[in-house]
Amino acid sequence: MQSMQIKEDKDDQHGQVDSASALQQYLDLITITSISGIYNSLVLEIKAGDTIRDAIHMLYEKETFGAAIVDVLDTETSDVRFSDRYIGFISFPNIILWCLEEYENIKEDANDNHSHLKDIEHDDLFSILDQIPQIGQTKVGELAKSFLWEPFFPVHLNDTILHALLLLSKHRLQVLPVIQQPDAPLIGFVTQNALVELLLRSSELEWFDNIANKNLSDFRFEGQEHPRCVFGSQSVADALKLLWQNQTCAVAVVDRQTKKLIGNVRNSDIYNLVKNNDLLRNRRILTVEEFLRTETDITYAEPITENDHGANQTAGNLRLKNSSNQTAGNLRLKNSSKSRMDSPVSNKENDTLKQVMQQMAKTNSSFSFLINGNQQVTGLITVRDIILQFAPPCVNSSIGGGGFFELALEQSKCHISNGTIIRNR
């Protein structure tokens, strides 16, 4: 891997790094092509003028986590580059959460004109969407006002990991679309987990271990003080509402008496509800604890990777489900190592950042719950929290960047001032 060679070169130069390239030597020479599996990504497009019903159906049939949104108007403009047609990225869980929330709002406001809602209560999701046009016939483009879209920031194959880290740390993105050249269509996606796994390949290198071997108690994470929790005795509908209101990746399920962590409900688990109409129909009476024990044929529904270069899964594929018999390191994913709902990913404060990264990679998870000695939830660590620890400083601000880059600057006798690298005198 290039980062290993970079470290060796640095040592050969007597540990002295030029200030202008202090931040560049580690990650700015590693291109996006170092991430395996990009060409195996299933790339879907949804037009801004498509209906919600059609968008959900396509993602469901393809068992795909999300899709790029194409501006309908741009497709009719001859002087617009092909890649400029893309205006956002939308995920399957977000669309479903929006539909369920709208459905509940309509029910609350129901009058005689909406008495038919009781008649369709036991129908499947697509039948409900067909019978409630104000939901099913809503255009995808209209969901922008509900902040369901992610901004569209494509990367090129010759862009570097440094560039990708900058984008993912500055913006709240689940994926980075990959294009080969400005006038070409999408060829795949890079996920947050892809970059974390790529960073893990630098394990045992000094620059990496100086940060990754620190205990979690040495860090301060965004979601640490306000974890979202639901009691196991509450309904699945309550958990879904928390997911929607907080726009979070997961809520912890805790025992009402002991407050111990007993499970989790992730936004990806919404796919189970669509797949199993009984679960969807009974979401208001089915307890979360019962939901945790529900057996489904779903293997996973989070952005994961299909590899084509022999490394652990690291990039791109947004498939909701895959086939079985996968073992670590296979060229193709055969099944998922995603944890069960009743076996949530968790860590303690005396665990290291590297241990969290390894556990997230092993379980295809985008988060880990922070727990105390009594198994009670004290925080939520996301894959973005990890990326922020390795992220470069923002070149257009005075923000200093993550711990790795602070260390690189310190070692090269430099500092950041107003977004500029300055050599210390």
Image (spheres, rainbow, N blue to C red):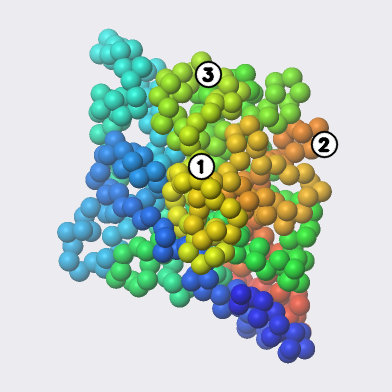
Marks 1 and 3, the one that precedes in the sequence: 3
Real-space Cα separation, disc 3 to disc 2, in angstroms: 30 Å
- The type of residue carrying mark 1 is Tyr
Left or right: 186 with respect to 381?
left
In this rendering, the answer to whether 61 lies above or below 284 is below
Rendered residue at 59%/34% (across/down)? 341
- Which residue matches tag 1? 300
- Which residue matches tag 3? 286
Give the residue furthest to the front.
Answer: 325
Numbered label attached to residue 318: none
The secondary element bearing badge 3 is classed as loop
Question: Is any atom of residue 163 visible in this view?
Answer: no
Left or right: 316 with respect to 358?
left
Rendered residue at 61%/75% (across/down)? 1
Q: Are marks 2 and 1 in contact (CB under 8 Å)?
A: no
In this rendering, the answer to whether 58 lies above or below 71 is above
Of circles 2 and 1, which is in front?
Answer: 1
Rendering coords of residue 72 (x, y %): 23, 52
> Badge 1: how crowded within 10 Å, few (<14), some, or many (20+)?
many
Rendering coords of residue 37 (x, y %): 47, 62
Rendered residue at 33%/20% (across/down)? 123
Real-space Cα separation, disc 2 to disc 1, in angstroms: 29 Å
- Which residue matches tag 2? 373
- The type of residue carrying mark 2 is Gly
